[in-house]
Image (cartoon, rainbow, N blue to C red):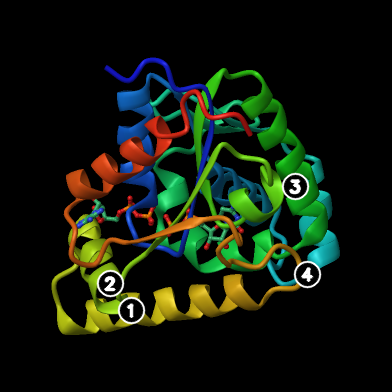
Amino acid sequence: MSADFTGQVALDGPSGTGKSSVARAVAARLGAAYLDTGAMYRAATVAVLDAGVDPEDAEAVAAAVAAAAVEVGTAADTELVQVDGVDVAVRIRGPEVTRAVSAVSAVPAVRRRLVDQQRALVAAADAVVVEGRDIGTVVLPDATLKVYLTAAPEARAQRRAAQLGLTTPDEIAELAADLRRRDEYDSSRADSPLRPAEDAVVVDSTHLDREGVVDRVVELALSTVGVAR
Ligand SMILES: Nc1ncnc2c1ncn2[C@@H]1O[C@H](COP(=O)(O)OP(=O)(O)O)[C@@H](O)[C@H]1O
Ligand SMILES: Nc1ccn([C@@H]2O[C@H](COP(=O)(O)OP(=O)(O)O)[C@@H](O)[C@H]2O)c(=O)n1
């Protein structure tokens, strides 16, 4: 049994490496809460699009996000994502939001607002798994365990295509291009770029199945139990 883990697991990495599915399963195994910070940036993007704002207009983006109430749940077995009380759990995964989310999440005022919210949610939990891009580097620099998930670009594109039910070569090429564009945007932005924390354990999931990655992260988390930090 693994009920005795307390603390925070930070799980970072680029798109399609398995963060969401692994983080949820690890949280369930550890009896921990789960926080999907990408869902928060996606929900903020819904607010920006609904306000009719250009996602590249940083000032207008910051104002639109400041005026919206973004709410996410922290249970591993349900997905609650709301903007101003409206359920957007399905909409945040659509192509319109995916295209605009990197521009919205590069705006420092947006990040400050959501990071404050993320830290408050984390503080309310004895044990929590938090996934994103900057959890180990910025949001929780003292996390109990930091894992950085990687996978070969082809594997990531294939997984995402299967998840979205895309089959034609054109659709898959467009998706691979979108992953490259977001990798580049997220890694090169000035505020909180995507990169592994110095003390993160890097796990390459290219040749591991999902359960293999979950086992590895749970094992790493349990190895921290009883270890003073
Ligand atoms: N190790 C793995 N091998 C194969 N497929 C995986 C693996 N990990 C996750 N997946 C699948 O890949 C897709 C993308 O995973 P997801 O957790 O959404 O990634 P991320 O949150 O990093 O974007 C999902 O359909 C998921 O079930
Ligand atoms: N902690 C985080 C999480 C996500 N993001 C941004 O939000 C976008 C969507 O995150 P996500 O985790 O839902 O993306 P996928 O990996 O599911 O495609 C990323 O491409 C980043 O631009 C971020 O900047 N910081």
- Give the quarter of the image for residue 43: top right
Q: Residues within 10 Å of mark 3 (few under 14, many from 20)?
A: many
Question: Whole-Å distance between the Cαs marked 4 and 2?
Answer: 29 Å
Residue carrying label 2: 157
Q: Which residue is mark 1?
A: 176
- Provide the residue designation for mark 3: 65
What amino acid does circle 4 point to? Asp
Q: Of helix, strand and loop, which one carries label 4?
A: loop
Between residue 141 and residue 159, name the one nearer to us.
Answer: 141
Q: Is residue 121 above or below residue 145?
A: above
Q: Are marks 4 and 1 in contact (CB under 8 Å)?
A: no
Q: Which mark is residue 57?
A: 4
Q: Secondary structure at mark 3?
A: helix
Looking at the image, residue 159 sits to the left or right of residue 222; the answer is left
Element class at badge 1: helix
Whichever of callouts 4 and 3 sits on the residue coming sooner in the sequence is 4
The N terminus: image quadrant: top left
